[in-house]
Amino acid sequence: MPYVTIKMLAGRTDEQKKALVEKVTDAVVETTGAKKESVVVFIEEMTKDHYAVAGKRLSDAE
Amino acid sequence: MPYVTIKMLAGRTDEQKKALVEKVTDAVVETTGAKKESVVVFIEEMTKDHYAVAGKRLSDAE
Amino acid sequence: MPYVTIKMLAGRTDEQKKALVEKVTDAVVETTGAKKESVVVFIEEMTKDHYAVAGKRLSDAE
Amino acid sequence: MPYVTIKMLAGRTDEQKKALVEKVTDAVVETTGAKKESVVVFIEEMTKDHYAVAGKRLSDAE
Amino acid sequence: MPYVTIKMLAGRTDEQKKALVEKVTDAVVETTGAKKESVVVFIEEMTKDHYAVAGKRLSDAE
Amino acid sequence: MPYVTIKMLAGRTDEQKKALVEKVTDAVVETTGAKKESVVVFIEEMTKDHYAVAGKRLSDAE
């Protein structure tokens, strides 16, 4: 606790994801006082045909 | 805003998904007064072995 | 199935929410071929102090 | 209703998942009084590179 | 891990919720081999005006 | 995009939440290359009677 879910388009590199969970965890610890070992981060990737803004999927907008 | 997540079994065609996000977005705009460009839709697909009703997965029910 | 979750700021009227679930359900049925009685809609309301864009909460932006 | 989502690392066998949804459904029925046919269970699997504790992904910890 | 989210209508007693998380946790441990101390359960309650089946909210159906 | 959901126990101050969304947003921008204005953060608070570890709710553990 806290539990952080990050939902984003697929395509980031493994190094980016590694840095993402490190930096986000540090930000949570610094601002909430949670213990680092209790912070959990989930990454959820989505594809462009499953994500729409204004009624149009990213896969249709290209 | 609003953010709409639609969870359904895999198997719909690309045309169906395209129409789904369009029509759902229109329905949200029409009834909530949200601006169309602020409506976000996510599609999440599930498989029959990860979905159960009454304790039985769809993959076991077939 | 499908299961639709609509996340939005608190503040819509009861009539708006009633119309929202009706129209969204119709849109899902029309485009996916799902039976109407199998479509489930959840509304989740959020408050302005729990929602941020660009690092700023709506409650801080006012 | 209730709707139960079980998020876990990929790797369980099909037999384990079948038993999981059965037993969890029974536990929900027994303790909440819900009818068995109204209990829905979703399984969501995650991979070790998308799950972090204490700022470190499981894929980096190995 | 696993992380279990149980979404249901408000109205269960405190004793029911206590028993629910105990029995569901036991069911997860028994079937997945997860350690009991690693199983996390979240309860999310919804109200009848935020939950609809077949386009009709429970609060409108009464 | 990305969309970040932070689930934690109620009890943090308004200042802590304000700092939390700022720092987490900065961490996401720095590591993923996303534009700051496209990063969305949701805070979800839970209560001790709706959160259990090892089959015991925090409200029962006190």
Image (cartoon, coloured by chain):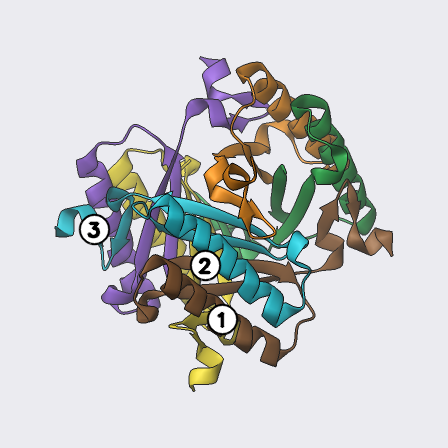
Chain colours: A orange, B cyan, C brown, D purple, E yellow, F green
Q: Which mark's residue is nearer the viewer, 2 or 1?
A: 1
Residue F40 sits in which quadrant?
A: top right
Mark 1: secondary structure: helix
Mark 3: secondary structure: helix
Quickly name the residue at label 2.
C4
Quickly name the residue at label 3.
B58
- Callout 3 amino acid: Leu
Q: Position of residue C58 (x, y in %)?
A: 79, 53
Choose the circle earlier in sequence order: 2 or 1: 2
- Separation of marks 2 and 1 at Cα, in angstroms: 12 Å
Q: Position of residue D42 (x, y in %)?
A: 34, 49
Task: Give the chain letter at badge 2.
Answer: C
- Separation of marks 3 and 1 at Cα, in angstroms: 28 Å
Can residue B1 be seen from the camera position used here?
no
- Give the quarter of the figure containing the C terminus of chain A: top right
Confirm or deny contact between disc 3 and disc 1 (CB under 8 A): no
- Callout 2 amino acid: Val
